[in-house]
Amino acid sequence: MKSIVKQFLLYRYHRPRRLFSTNIVTDVTTTNNLTKTLANKVALVTGSTSGIGLGIAETLAENGCSICLNGFGENIDEIVTSMEKKYNVPVMYNGANMLNRHEIKDMIENDIKSTFGTSVDILVNNCGMQHVSPIESFDEDIFEKVIQLNLTSNFYTTKYVLNDMREKEYGRIINIASTHGKVASVNKSAYVASKHGVVGLTKTIALETAKDTNITCNAICPGFVLTPLVAAQIDVIADNKNITFEEAGKDLLSEKVPSENFVTVEQLGGLCSFLCSDNAEQLTGQDIAVDGGWTSV
Ligand code: NAD
């Protein structure tokens, strides 16, 4: 008898937080008002001056988030101003080089906090690069740079945001991995290794935050998205085969993607917003493919 009581007490103590929630089926509260949930949340999207990162930042801004843009390029002031005007939310820019952990720390612990008066709620680890070469001729420095930018930077950003997320009892970490976090392709050793690493890191973060209130970590694994990163690869195919950019794009898609379509940045932004919602509170540790069926083959 004694041991049953002990087991019950142990069970109560260790029970999943939500098990005895009074919010059972009859008590349905509206938790899907995305704009309400995301209003005034601070979102840091790394590598958001172009491509996927910019698309995700736009969608989060549309849903009311304050945005910290990051990355390199021209016309960044214009991007900041037009985003602020279009979505009526505060937008800042920090040009931290994601290869430098001191700059990452300073962006997260000083610049964002002093600009917005609060810490990061939503972290989208998006910055990344590609390099295509057979292993024998793969430049060693470039290999290390790809790993550092695509994988190691995600570790540092996460390390610097986690304590504040725990204190706020809300946090979303979304790692933009790739189909190449699930399957490989020839001549992409650094990219494939880094993205498989991102998927592993995602699962570890999810486990380490599983008992925290309302913190999740997931990876999104896009197929081909027509951004400067992929356009550069299409250019190479076009040159090698002496065909047009459009024909080379079709070649690239038909080789890998059953739907023969590019994923759009809006589709990825929509998924990110859902992952940030209250309805996604128990969705954690996943590597979600958005790839037109590529990894189903
Ligand atoms: P992109 O080249 O358009 O954007 C990359 C962004 O990273 C830019 O804003 C750039 O300024 C920034 N950046 C590069 N080096 C940086 C550094 N050292 N410090 C800070 N910022 C830096 O690329 P994209 O296609 O939008 O890719 C974004 C992410 O999505 C990458 O992680 C990529 O691996 C991933 N991804 C892309 C595709 C695709 O088809 N485009 C598919 C799957 C995954």
Image (cartoon, helix red, strand yellow):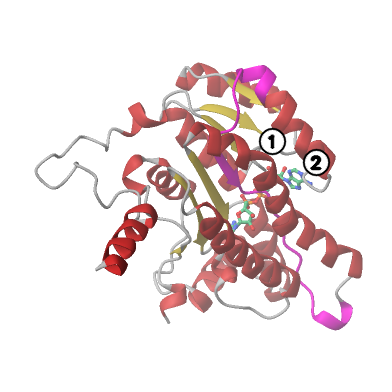
| Camera-side residue of 12 and 46 | 12
Q: Which of marks 1 and 2 is nearer the N terminus?
A: 1
| Camera-side residue of 121 and 287 | 121
Query: Which residue is labeled 2 in the image?
Result: 97
**Apparent side of residue 254 relative to residue 111 in the rendered image (left or right):** left
Residue 96 visible, this angle: no
Which amino acid, by three-letter code, is at mark 1?
Asn
**Apparent side of residue 126 relative to residue 256 in the rendered image (left or right):** right
Q: What element does badge 1 sit on?
A: loop
Residue 218 visible, this angle: yes
Q: Where is residue 231? Give x, y as percent.
A: 64, 57
Q: What stretch is highlighted in magenta?
A: 113-137
**Apparent side of residue 193 relative to residue 273 in the rendered image (left or right):** right
| Camera-side residue of 204 and 277 | 204
Residue labelled 1 has its Cβ within 8 Å of some atom of ligand 1: yes
Q: Does the magenta stretch include residue 119?
A: yes
**Apparent side of residue 7 relative to residue 213 in the rendered image (left or right):** left
Residue labelled 2 has its Cβ within 8 Å of some atom of ligand 1: yes
Q: Mark 1 Cα within 10 Å, few/some/many (few <14, many 20+)?
A: many
Give the vertical position of 161 relative to 149 (above or below): above
Query: Which residue is labeled 1 in the image?
Result: 70
Residue at image coords 59%, 32%? 120
Q: Which residue lies furthest to the front in this view?
A: 2
Q: Where is residue 229? Give x, y as percent.
A: 67, 55
Residue at image coords 72%, 39%? 71
* Picture mark count: 2
Q: Where is residue 135? Give x, y as percent.
A: 82, 80
Which amino acid, by three-letter code, is at mark 2?
Asn
Q: Is residue 150 magenta?
A: no
